[in-house]
Amino acid sequence: MLSEVEVTYFRSRIDDVLGEGRMSAWQRDFLLDMRQKIERYGTRTRFSEKQLATLKRLTVIKGDADLRLVVSNIAPRRQRRSRYWALSYREQKFLIMAVVLAVLAIASISRQIADNFHFSVPVGSPDSSQSRNFSITDGDTIKMDDGTPIRLVGYNTPEKFEPRCDHERELGIRASNRLVEIVSSGKSTVTKVACSCKPGTEGTSKCNYGRSCGILRVDGRDVGQTLISEGLAVPFLCGAGGCPPTPRPWCG
């Protein structure tokens, strides 16, 4: 299983690598599968040795990520004192590891602050109405503190994780950041609604990729209407048992 720092690190690096777009089709599909697995299971995520090795290779940060490469180049006489630092090579190894871990921790905190603002809101549902937290995944998806992902209905925003072009990715990031601003500006209410899926499939991967559905309002106004009015989303209306093709007009 992964630690909280590893979850944040791999999620951040996968997003960065996908955003660069310099990879083969199988590498892209592999990273998307791994990110979906991390998103669903968090610190309970389990990888095979082969999956973990491939994930590290595809997300490695040149010069930092594999400390074993640094350590393997240290001279055999490890107790010999460094000419400049007055430290043994074992002490230098420990210091390097401490610095890298500190950098990763700071990066994970910064990433979480930038992309996953948490908010306390009353969640309206037929069974309960209590205060919970949620984080913003992108412009039309949030995740409750119990791990439940919720697709916000009535609109669709550009993709920032799987864009078809650079323009869509830029708009997707703007839509996600704008949703953070909207939620920060007033009182938020999440109301869960039934997903537009075939009977008996809700809650499974055959219905909305296993996500729940809901409406997010800030000071009583549906956030989707605000994003549509600002050109950061388009209407996306589904029927009782299904949805039309997802509108994605941002790449021409």
Image (cartoon, rainbow, N blue to C red):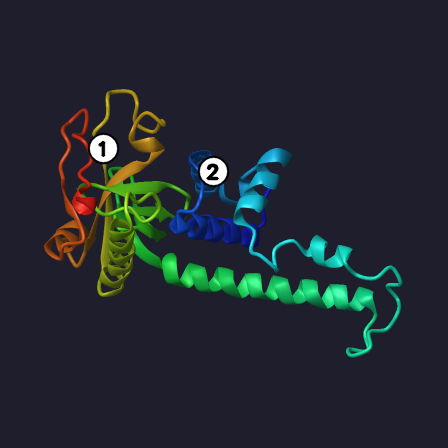
Q: Position of residue 122 (x, y in %)?
A: 28, 52
> Which residue is more in the foreground, 121 or 251?
251
Residue 43, located in which quarter of the rendered image? top right
Crowding near pointer 1: few (<14 within 10 Å), some, many (20+)? Answer: few
Q: Amino acid at mark 2?
A: Gln
Label 1 with label 2: CB-CB less than 8 Å? no
Q: Quadrant of the N terminus?
A: top right
Of tags 1 and 2, which is closer to the observer? Answer: 2
Q: What's the mark number on residue 131?
A: none
On residue 194, the disc is 1
- Going 35% across and 42% down the picture, which residue do you hit? 149
Quadrant in which residue 110 is drawn? bottom left
Whether residue 157 is situated above or below residue 61 in the rendered picture: above
Q: Secondary structure at mark 2?
A: helix
Q: Quadrant of the C terminus?
A: top left
Separation of disc 1 and disc 2 at Cα?
35 Å
Tell me residue 118's x, y (percent): 37, 58
The front one of 222 and 63 is 63
Q: Which residue is mark 2?
A: 27
